Image (tube, rainbow, N blue to C red):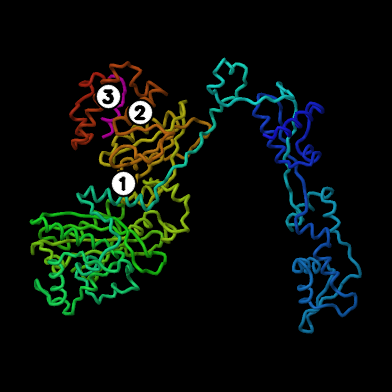
Amino acid sequence: MATELVELILEKVDKFGKINSLNLANEIKEDHQKIIGAIKSLQTLDDVIYVEQISEKKWEPTAEGQHVIEHGSHEAAVYNAIPNDKTGISQADIMKSVAYAKVGFSKALAAGWIKIDKTSGQPIVTKNKASIEDTTQADLNNINQLDDKIKANYKKRKLVQEIVIKSFDIKKGNNFTLKIEKQEADLTSDLMINDAWKDKKFKAYNFNALGAALDVGHLHPLLKVRSEFRKIFLEMGFTEMPTNNFVESSFWNFDALFQPQQHPARDAHDTFFISDPKITKKLPQDYLEKVKQVHSKGGYGSQGYCYDWKIQEAQKNLLRTHTTAVSARMLYNLMQQGQFKPVKYFSIDRVFRNETLDATHLAEFQQVEGVIADYNLTLGDLIGTLYQFFKKLGIDKLEFKPAYNPYTEPSMEIFCYHEGLEKWIEIGNSGVFRPEMLLPMGLPPNVNVIAWGLSLERPTMIKYKLNNIRDLVGPKVDLQMVYNNPICRLEKMENSTQINKLINNNNSNNNRGLPITFKCRGKINKEQLVIFCDPKYPIKWLGSLLEKAKKLFTLSMSIHLHSTVKNVSNELVNYYAHNNDDDDDDDDPVVKIHFIWKNNIGIDPVMNLNSFDCIFGAVNIARYFNRLIESVDPLVLVYESMGTIYSCEINKIIDKIHSYLHSGKTIKEISCLFGKKTNVPLLDRPSIIDIILESS
């Protein structure tokens, strides 16, 4: 802090007993904000000064109002611009020569100061009064003496404005002193030597202050979706292909894929060719001759393209236009091992095309490629695999359109509905590799290869609802978007109408919602809890528990879907919608519960849930509610108040019921297995077991 300014404030307070920060700033010709900064610094000390904030409202003219004060009102300016003779002046000339003429003209006309004659065709303005009194200018020169109604009228005209001036009154505190000793913030080794710390004063520790935020890296949405793609491929049993060669030869990029040398994609306006080194000669000669043969003369049941195939074209280096070049090399290398075996390959890496940039195209983008080689594969296998692949990604609106590719037959373009653009967009291409491509590699005739390729950017745009690819990559990207976007998303379900629709349609993907609050009947400590639920094992007895709970305490609930889940279990939704109660009392303590339906139960490592307690699984949910209800009224449900042995026996029965549920039995079947309550002596008092067994 500025020591001189602090000492000056203390001297003034000591001399006068009380000072005002604004008056002090005017007196010493110092910026008021600097005075306030020094006062804030003094406030951190132990009761050295007492500070009271003072707020004062003040009226002052706006920039337009200041113009009126200096030059007269707008209506007076219009009046004064008119000649005193009866010839007048054209309205157009007034509009050009007078500031704020439009407002002034209407005000002067309404006040009867001027009149307008339109008989000659051109509007002529003349004075209607010999003299006027400019009350507006006079009023603005004495704003503070005006009536509130008049001030409000001038404020409406944007001639005056009300401002609030905040200042501070400073008085002596209980520990007032003119000498300020710097307080220590850290207990260092130097202070520990010879007990020097005993003579020092330390700043009070602020337990409410947040620690310094660490600057850490954040995954770009594109990398997050890439991680999801990669995880899906690995879950489906695919092996990742090496894709570290951005520079590729035309042979592997085009010729090996049975793409003719005169194809338009091999022109410079579609492909980036390399100038240095311009060509490569490291090509497998035996395989090259087979490719040349099938291109120029045909073979394997095909007549080929019947043209003069040139090795000079095949040797040209380029920036690869697709990762299918890698797939071709992998299939060739597979047969170099001497025997075919079914394989599933995938790759995700950059490719380059000489594209015109627009909302959905870039010259450089990430291509996702999947390849399956096996005996007797069909187009049905390809379509089924694609549906399964995109379903795991959370995209279920797919369409396929027949297409042409030089290296696949049949071929299909893949379309997906984009929520942001609100239209179907192409996200990839697919097909069955042609025999002309596979047989020269040495693959058996009854082996088919299905493959698909798509960009990584377009599914990412769909997932994050972006309608322009330049908002995802490039210099216009909002870095805060990269910081804030989660790797997983929680969809929150909305009001009861949408929930009932959800129950009927069993589709929760587009519903979001508001919490439901139940009336409080008792007192309980405020709690905030996250409950993770597995959609494979719905909580069939939760509705009965909620009926008990809502009679005892306020229960605020919200239901979310983790990005791993598409369809929520209807049981929980039914209870959620059925128990809607609009009677809310903000003064009552609230138990806030966030239900998250999530596959593979457990906290996602990137989910920030530090401020919540978490529960996993149906058994623990039962125990939690049992404890919660018992803490308010032990007569409703008992659990731990009966002792450790009793609660352990309850736990055993809950575990047994849960194992039955996992085996496929219903609550009704489980209830029959237990028989009458007399067969379970622990249930002589109401417990969670009664709730579970009676819920059927």
Position of residue 55 measured from the top left corner of the image (x, y, whole percent):
73, 39
Across and down, in percent, residue 631 comes to 40, 23
Q: CA distance from mark 1 to mark 2?
A: 24 Å
**Segment colored magenta:** 684-696
* Distance from Cα at disc 2 to Cα at disc 3: 12 Å
Which residue is label 1 attached to? 565
The extreme bottom residue here reads: 120
- Out of 8 and 467, give the one closest to the viewer: 8
Residue that numbered label 3 is attached to:
651
The numbered disc on residue 624 is 2
Can you give x and y, in whole percent of width and height, for residue 425 in the image?
Answer: 34, 64
Magenta stretch contains residue 383: no
**131 relative position to 214: left or right:** right
The three-letter code of the residue at mark 2 reads Tyr
Q: Residues within 10 Å of mark 3 (few under 14, many from 20)?
A: some
Please name the residue shown 62% across and 20% down the image.
200
In front: mark 1 or mark 2? 1
Position of 215 with respect to 657 (left or right) is right
Of the 4 image quadrants, the one containing the C terminus is: top left
Q: Main secondary structure of the magenta part?
A: helix
Position of the N terminus, as image quadrant, is: top right
Task: Indicate the amino acid at tag 1.
Answer: Val
Q: Residues within 10 Å of mark 1 (few under 14, many from 20)?
A: many
